[in-house]
Amino acid sequence: MENFAQAQARAPDLGETSAIPVRLVPLPNGPYEVTGLLEIARPDGDPIGAPASKVHLCRCGRSADKPFCDGSHARTGWTDGA
């Protein structure tokens, strides 16, 4: 998987800012799948983990690794309609 700098280097030059579209898709009965050039940060701005091009974010609220999904939705029977 490429790192943040590699993805940024490959991004098209759009003037002062380079942008890679970010896509967020709620997976059926599962997490949010977020793709694009991503850096997840804490409220104080400190990054959480390494930059990535795809992450799965908790949608059920049960993950022990928030904001990331740890599969708790499947173990606990969480569904979209819950």
Image: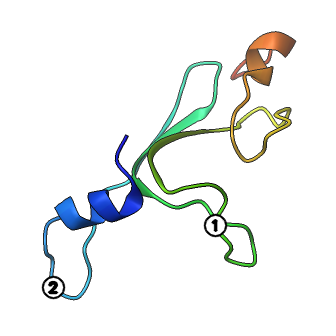
Q: Residues within 10 Å of mark 2 (few under 14, many from 20)?
A: few
- The residue that appears at 64% across and 66% down in the rendered structure is 47
Q: Is residue 15 above or below residue 43?
A: below
Viewport quadrant of the C terminus = top right
Q: Amino acid at mark 1?
A: Pro
Q: Which mark is residue 15?
A: 2
| Snapshot quadrant of residue 49 | bottom right
Q: Secondary structure at mark 2?
A: loop
| Snapshot quadrant of residue 18 | bottom left
Q: Residue tagged by mark 1? A: 47
The numbered mark, 1 or 2, whose residue comes first in the sequence reads 2
- The residue that appears at 15% across and 77% down in the rendered structure is 14
Q: Position of residue 40 (x, y in %)?
A: 59, 60
Q: In the figure, is residue 30 to the left or right of 10?
A: right
Q: Position of residue 55 (x, y in %)?
A: 53, 41
Can the viewer see residue 68? yes
Viewport quadrant of the N terminus = top left
Q: Residues within 10 Å of mark 1 (few under 14, many from 20)?
A: few
Q: Amino acid at mark 2?
A: Gly
Q: In the figure, is residue 68 to the left or right of 82?
A: left
Q: Position of residue 23 (x, y in %)?
A: 39, 47
Q: CA distance from mark 1 to mark 2?
A: 25 Å
Q: Position of residue 53 (x, y in %)?
A: 40, 47
Q: Which mark is residue 59?
A: none
Q: Can you tell which of label 1 and label 2 is closer to the viewer?
A: 1
Residue extending farthest to the bottom is: 16
